[in-house]
Amino acid sequence: MSTVMCTRAPNRLKQVKFFAGFPDKLLEILEKSASVRKFRKNSHIIVGGEESLAVYVLQSGTAYAFTSDEEGNEFIVGSFGEGDCFGELGLLDSKPRTASVVTTSNCECLVIAKSNLLHAIESDAAIGMAVIQSLVGRIRGMTDDVSCLALMDVYGRLARVIQSEATERDDGTRSTGRITHRELASRVGSSREMISKILKDLRIGGYIDVNRHCIVLRKSLPDRW
């Protein structure tokens, strides 16, 4: 069983982009009714096809969303880190989950029940507009992802993922979090062998280092490879 604990939620929703338009009073109500659940690494938080009953806010750890075919081939459609919100789309149309979410480390999630979130949205027209704006932003991001798959080669898609995942460290370099060749292959629609080859070439060229599955950018990646 993936859930190892359930406790009262702390006050953290103000920092979550999806809830940016919610007034403080409603956020307080949502937080009081929410819970915190812990999941071990490689556990499913959401399973595709199941009923949508809650929205999740990742408070610690990392996870990714994916779809798969009948042969078990996976395609990663999103990755999540601290402060990211997921599962909200299924609450708004009452249809089954279209993707699964699995943890890549031990995770702690804030869980908000569907009924509580929908009640908050219906109570204030301004909240409804804020949610619409959030969903528009999500659609724009998905459009960019589809365009990249259609128009970029494997290197271009891989470079885009690396650069979007990299954050600045204390020493001034930029590094991704832990991400495996398998995850990268699923995200860019390629084979692990091709990803390994490109990363090896980038290391030889002095563009990156790889430390414990974290990709460290040593200099700007070339436009083409």
Image (tube, grey):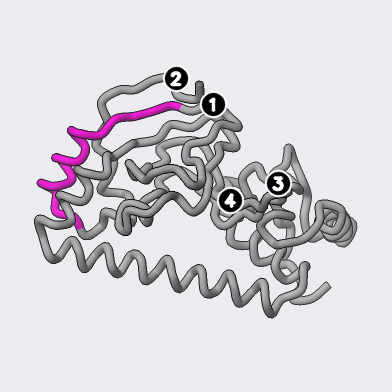
Per the model, the C-alpha gap separating discs 3 and 1 is: 22 Å
Between discs 3 and 1, the one toward the N terminus? 1
Query: What residue is rendered at 27% in x and 54% in y?
Result: 19
Q: Position of residue 216 (x, y in %)?
A: 70, 51
Of 148 and 89, nearer the camera is 89
- Disc on res. 72: 3
The residues tagged by marks 1 and 4 sit, at their Cα atoms, a distance apart of 18 Å
Mark 4 element type: strand
The residue singled out by tag 4 in the image is: 66
Please name which of the two marks, 4 or 3, marks the residue nearer to the observer: 3
Q: Are marks 1 and 4 in contact (CB under 8 Å)?
A: no
Residue marked by disc 2: 4
Name the disc covering residue 40, or none: 1
- Which tag, 1 or 4, sits closer to the chain's start? 1
| Amino acid type, callout 3 | Gly
Q: Which residues are magenta?
A: 22-38
Q: Earlier in the sequence, mark 4 or mark 3?
A: 4
Asked if the residue at tag 1 contacts the one at tag 2, i.e. Cβ–Cβ closer than 8 Å, the answer is yes
Q: Position of residue 80 (x, y in %)?
A: 50, 48
Label 2 Cα neighbours within 10 Å, binned few <14 / some 14-19 / many ≥20: few
Q: Secondary structure at mark 1?
A: loop
N-terminal-most mark, 2 or 3: 2
Based on the displayed image, in which of its 4 quarters is residue 164 positioned? bottom right
